[in-house]
Image (tube, rainbow, N blue to C red):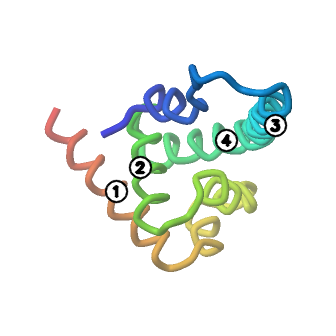
Amino acid sequence: MNSREDHERDAVVPVSREPRSAEQDVLHLRREVDELRRALRTRPMIDVALGMVMATEGCSLEEAWLIMVHSSQRTNTKLHTLALRLTDSSASPISASLSALPPTAVTAYQRHARVWAKRGSRS
């Protein structure tokens, strides 16, 4: 499984060694800036959602990250969208926050949370 650091490293746009025109360089840099701006906008929301998962499930940051990533992948939901839905009702208990998610995302979240809970009880 990919750790949080692996996921972030893989999100970096690879640098091409082929010669490019100035116009291609500008387009590449604009795309990179757009991606970085989006990451800066969504990162705090993802961090809050991770904290919610950690508090609810009593798991580590790494375990919360894996729960969120697995839930995102299983439901074909962008991670920042899943985090937004979890944090939208952050003043409510997590069960109320889960009601804002599509049923498949809730099921995936609950499944992964149970797996991590079982792993923790074996330690």
Of callouts 3 and 4, which one flags the residue occurring earlier in the amino acid sequence? 3
Name the image quarter holding the N terminus: top left
Q: Earlier in the sequence, mark 2 or mark 4?
A: 4
Q: Which residue is mark 1?
A: 112
> Which of disc 2 and disc 3 is earlier in sequence?
3
| Mark 1 Cα-neighbour bin, 10 Å: few <14, some 14–19, many ≥20 | many
Q: Secondary structure at mark 4?
A: helix
- The residue under label 2 is 67
Residue type at numbered disc 4: Val
For the residues bearing labels 2 and 1, Cβ distance under 8 angstroms: yes
Horizontal and vertical percent for residue 77?
56, 64
Amino acid at dot 1: His
Residue in the image at 70% along x and 37% along y? 43
88 is higher (above) or lower (below) than 120: below
Tell whether 83 sits left or right of 2: right
Q: Quadrant of residue 37?
A: top right
Viewer-side label of 3, 2? 3
Q: What residue did someone put label 3 on? A: 27
- Residue at numbered disc 4: 48
> The C terminus appears in which quarter of the rendering?
top left
Q: Quadrant of residue 84?
A: bottom right
The answer to whether mark 3 and mark 2 are in CB contact below 8 A is no
Q: Taking 4 as reference, is 121 above or below it?
A: below
- Left or right: 111 as drawn, with respect to 96: left
Mark carried by residue 77: none
Residue 78 locus on image (x, y percent): 59, 58
Image height check: is 63 above or below 26?
A: below
Secondary structure beneath label 2: helix
Relative horizontal placement of residue 31, taking residue 60 as reference (left or right): right
Q: Mark 3 belongs to which amino acid? A: Leu
